[in-house]
Image: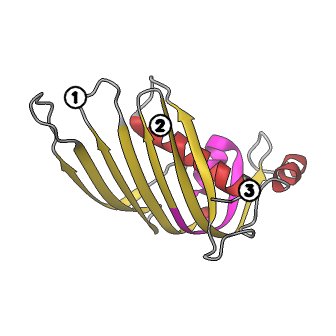
Amino acid sequence: MSKIIFDDVHAEILEIQNVPEKNEKTSVTAKALLMGEAPITLNWSFDAKKESDAFTASGTVKNFHSKNINSFLESNLRVRAKGEIQELYFTISGNSISSSGDMKMKYEDFKFSVLKKDRLRINKLLTAIGSLFVNDGSNTDENGYRYGGIKAERDPTKSFFNYLWLNVGDGLTSTIIGNGKK
């Protein structure tokens, strides 16, 4: 199965409107279980009346075993992950063109394997090169966190959730490969 699944979804949406006289933003608060296991939250707010599509979003993921998303990673990105994300926090602000933010993450023994085109065998050369850049979770602050930045550009032909995924993906890359400093 090459899907990302959210189970037990609970969401609240407030101030759905576009009345010019009202100055209230729409806010979305959601909780779910990512792949039926890991608690995930999303807080998203925006002003539907603003043409810039300005928004803020923040979220968390806790106790996520990466093996649970491997079917999606293998079929879409030709990679396989190993390890556990104990805690992940992100904050993003942006508009219809670009966004930026930050991420902090606590994880253990996180590793990626790059797969060959057949998606069955590991490309040992690319995996070895990649492992030079991936931090295994060491080099953290006193609380066990590594930090990363987020920068993304929106593809206007795709949904906001694709944009959100691009932001989280950029933050993960920055946190795992970067120097991990705040």
Q: Quadrant of residue 47?
A: top left
Is residue 143 placed above or below 40 in the rendered structure? below
Magenta residues span 67-88
Identify the disc placed on residue 128.
none
Q: Position of residue 20 (x, y in %)?
A: 12, 27
* Residue name at image x 34 percent, y 53 percent: 43
Q: Earlier in the sequence, mark 1 or mark 3?
A: 1
* Residue name at image x 40 percent, y 36 percent: 160
Q: Check disc 1 and give the amino acid type.
A: Lys
Residue 68 visible in the shown view: no
Colour scheme shown: secondary structure
Q: Check disc 3 and give the amino acid type.
A: Asn
Whole-Å distance between the Cαs marked 1 and 3? Answer: 39 Å
Examine the structure image and report whether residue 103 is included in the region drawn in magenta: no
* Badge 2 element: helix
Mark 1 — residue?
A: 49
Q: Position of residue 168 (x, y in %)?
A: 53, 48
Left or right of 109, for residue 60: left
Q: Position of residue 16 (x, y in %)?
A: 16, 40
* Badge 3 element: loop
Q: Earlier in the sequence, mark 2 or mark 1?
A: 1
Mark 3 — residue?
A: 179
Q: Position of residue 113 (x, y in %)?
A: 77, 54
Foreground of the two, 98 or 84: 98
